[in-house]
Image: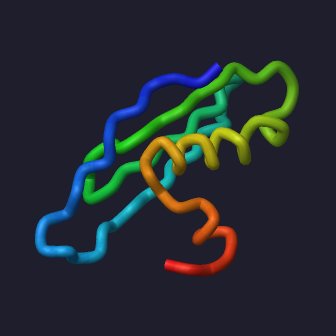
Amino acid sequence: PSTTTSPATGNAGGADRVRVLGIDTATWRASVGLVADGVPVAERHQLVRSSHAAVLLPLIEETLRAAGVDTWALRNGRP
């Protein structure tokens, strides 16, 4: 189902990191990727038979966890 993860890289000096979550649903392959400060951190993809809706949220959460992002904090509005 899902593939490819790289470890998250630290940011020198403790400055805030710019993170971009990319989502692609243009084809039968649902893809999610996370980039931090221009560096790919994690990605997941899965073939979809009918609707991306069933797989998209789990792929996003899986990708964020693989990148070390605290998904609980995101759901609860904490930095």
In the image, is 12 to the left or to the right of 28? left
Q: Quadrant of the N terminus?
A: top right
Extreme-right residue of the structure: 50
- Looking at the picture, how far across and down is residue 52, in whole percent? 78, 36
Query: Image quadrant of residue 42?
Result: top left
In the image, is 19 to the left or to the right of 64? left
**Residue at (33% x, 56% y) in the render:** 36
In the image, is 25 to the left or to the right of 14? right
- Looking at the picture, how far across and down is residue 44, in whole percent? 54, 32
Instruction: Indicate the colouring scheme.
Output: rainbow
**Residue at (47% x, 36% y) in the render:** 43
Q: How many marks?
A: 0
Extreme-bottom residue of the structure: 78
Query: Image quadrant of residue 59?
Result: top right
Q: Is residue 2 above or below residue 41?
A: above
Extreme-left residue of the structure: 13
- Looking at the picture, how far across and down is residue 24, in whole percent? 59, 39
Which is more toward the observer, 59 or 72? 72
Q: Is residue 52 above or below residue 78?
A: above
- Looking at the picture, how far across and down is residue 14, in whole percent? 20, 74
Which is more toward the observer, 50 or 14? 14
**Residue at (58% x, 45% y) in the render:** 23
